[in-house]
Image (cartoon, coloured by chain):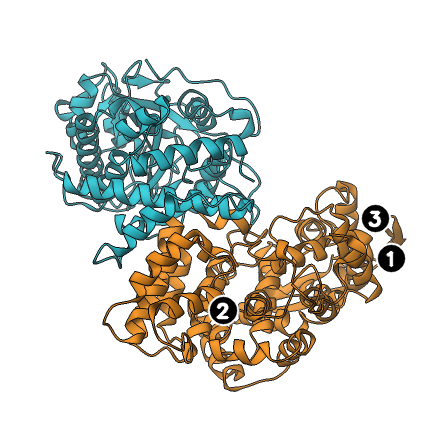
Amino acid sequence: MIDRRHFVTSLAGSVAALSLSGPLPGVFARAARHGRAGGEKVLVVIQLSGGNDGVNTLVPYGDDLYAKNRFSLAVPKDQVVRLDDYAGLHPALEPMAAMLEADRFSVVQGVGYPQPNRSHFESMDLWHTAHQLTGPQSTGWLGRAAGQLEQPGRLPPLHLGGEVQPLALATRGTPATSIRSIESFRLTFDGDGEVSKLLELSNGLPRQSGNPLLEHLEQGVAAATRASRRLAEVGNTRDRGVSYPTTGLAGKLRLVADLIAADMPVRVYYVTLDGFDTHANQGPAHASLLAELAGASAAFHGDLEKQGNLDRVLLFTFSEFGRRLKENGSFGTDHGAASIVQLTGPRMKSPLAGRYPSLTDLDEGDLKFTVDYRSLYATVLEQWLGVDPALVLDQRYPAVDLFA
Amino acid sequence: MDPATAWEPWSPADGDVWDLAKVAHLHRRAGFGTTWKQLAADAARTPAEVVRGLLDAATTTGPAEDDSVADVIAAGSEARRLASWWLLRMVRGSSAVRERLTLFWHGHFATSAAKVEQTRLMLAQYRTLRELGQGEFGALARAISCDPAMLVWLDCRESRKAKPNENFARELMELFCLGLGQYTEQDIRQLARCFTGSEIRYGQFRFNSFQHDRNEKRFLGAAGSYDREQAVDVVVKHPATARFLVHKLVRFHVADDLPADSPLIARLADWYRGEKLHTGKLLERILASRIFFSAEARGARISGPVELAVGLMRNFGLEANMDELASELAAIGQLPLYPPSVAGWEGGTTWINAQTLTGRANLVARLMQASAGRLPGAAGLGEKDDAASLVEGAVGWLLAVRPPAAVMKQLESIAGGTRNRSERLVRLVSALATLPEFHLA
């Protein structure tokens, strides 16, 4: 049930923002002027589905074993975007150079978990649930985090895309929403503006019914009105001077950027990019996927920078597993284990975090993990979202030194 | 309200009359709402007669009860089409009460086609819930304990003597009968032994006697060499079961927020036990009760997405593309046959946020517009046909709680003008759907 104190505060805030007339207490007037719910930190997760080849994304070019194992797929040394004298990025990630130079890019190396599962579904379920009870009762790590972040007026995590909602967002509380377009926040039938007029009037008349459900609904309608108004304003300045590539991922991130620009009360966004299961003829397919990822991310960050939101949005890019070190007989790679996670947005301590797994000490041909992914979750939960990791994960995990 | 009298039948009195608002309240909560004409007709009967009639209709069949279409869909692999089919039956079926109660049981024994995949198993489970949902709970629980869709959903395709599968035992106690805190992990392990020998083969339940543990089991204070059905009966007869079910049914029909430990619940649960957990009788008692028709119960629920859409379609007699409707419902949080987890839909305030409210209003507007002017359910509404009487009629019919006077005035300007009657109604109802009051049931 709604916390009364929060309810009253946020309702007063919304009325202020809507009517902008009459004397307002200072804090509400300020909030209304800035049109901002406090500039809270936002997490955007990009899921690379199918098992991204970490070895060819963060290339261990300094090790001869790399080229030996990747006889057809090895990225030539002179094309690697070097991060240190051992590892560097696939050239398709070139668009991330600006973020790299601004110390806003970090790759965590060797991310995985003990007893690696090489099934797409099972490993993805583990990442989504953070290794907690699987089955129909499962909840996702972000679903559980959202439960801790819940506040009146705030929206649950938002998944953008037409695919089934990722298990990571599953919760027993307020369900996450999936949307395909920004139209989900706009009334589609108010051609002559009569309904907006009605809402303006109605929202300015608190009901004082004593019915907590009606209070919840009033607050929801006020939030919906605010959202659609802000999005309309963003629409007017839609061209923020940023151009996005025409790819699917770029379209989704553009939508996220629009929502952030409109200051939607959302803390967690989730998007996916599929196609990383590159068992055959991996070279061009993987390069084009990485280019899609980098192009979309770079445009997104450029947009956020123009908005002045770069520091408060963290992009977290992961995949369910990496791929085998040795390429297969079809110019592709098979399911592997430890891989990388990319973090971009705020200022980072270093472009490389953790330690690159050994190319000789392998687990059935796969890289062994050096950082438990739950350590990364714990770090992001605690240091970015401000949620106690113990309430989301099954035990304590050491934090990873990421943020500057 | 005094628990001793709250569940006694309500009868009209001075200052507390049987009016259109009460008839509308009854139809919204018992079923999915009804046409304006039916409302007026029911206002001329007694409340007890109307409640009885609604429940009797639950045993009649009409064209929408013809099962052959469902069989055709179930022979295919698109379970989503079965959801569309069920939605159509909710809209057209001769008994809204029965479909709504089946929706309740579906949310209770929540099983998702997303995992079960075989459409025919989902249909078979739906038929079980519909067939047994209005009778004694014990029979329903026993049927669910060997329901193939449920056992596939809970990863219980097989439970062997040497390694009992505990999932069904856990959910039977936690989510289906007792609720958390009424049993121990030890109870789960013992109960799971009663279910050994259960197998699903080729979509059928089979009992493998070689894999059944015949030794004594001890759980919930009982001891015996129980088999599956006997074990279900032990759980069902536990006093917590009646309280747990009554609480859930009262939340679904009377008020979202009524606490589980309310003396009102305890009182009705005692009565329900005395009636051998007969849900049809319980439903009749709830729907005819003083508390049900009290001011406190009015607007004390938030309508779920299915109630919202099916209710609108039944009220106005609308037609729609049901596949499209299913997608729209998924986007606002409730696609039948696809509950989010075995715990079903949490409901109440969790239905509502800025995105779902906009989605709900857009859905209402689209359904109204798709009617192309045919609104048979609204025949007779607003006799004088002027804006004021259209607004007054529609608000009394569709809303549990009246919006403020200034809002009513503004609605009149939306419902006025020179357009024809059905266009004005479409505009009016679309506008109503943006108001907070519209989403209370």
Are marks 2 and 1 in one subunit?
yes
Q: Which residue is mark 1?
A: B225
Q: Which residue is mark 2?
A: B119
- Judged from the image, the secondary structure of the residue bearing numbered disc 3 is loop
Q: Which residue is mark 3?
A: B220
Q: Callout 1 environment at 10 Å: few (<14), some (14 to 19), or many (20+)?
A: some
Q: Provide the chain ID for the residue under circle 1.
A: B
- The x and y percentages for residue B66 are 52, 84
- The x and y percentages for residue A313 are 30, 27
Are marks 3 and 2 in one subunit?
yes
| Residue beneath the point at 31% across and 38% down | A18
Foreground of the two, B20 or A64: B20
Taking the image as shown, residue B30 lies to the left or right of residue B13, namely: left
Is residue A166 something that shows in the picture? no
| Residue beneath the point at 46% across and 36% down | A152
Lower sequence index among marks 3 and 2: 2
Foreground of the two, B395 or B122: B395
Q: Amino acid at mark 2?
A: Thr
Q: Callout 2 environment at 10 Å: few (<14), some (14 to 19), or many (20+)?
A: many
- Judged from the image, the secondary structure of the residue bearing numbered disc 2 is helix
Distance, label 3 to label 2, CA atoms, is: 36 Å
Q: Chain letter for cyan, please.
A: A
- The x and y percentages for residue A215 are 49, 44
Q: Amino acid at mark 1?
A: Ser
Position of residue A78 relative to residue B60, above or below, is above
Lower sequence index among marks 3 and 1: 3
Q: Callout 3 environment at 10 Å: few (<14), some (14 to 19), or many (20+)?
A: some
| Residue placed furthest toward the bottom | B63
- The x and y percentages for residue B251 are 63, 55
Q: Colour of chain B?
A: orange
Q: Amino acid at mark 3?
A: Leu
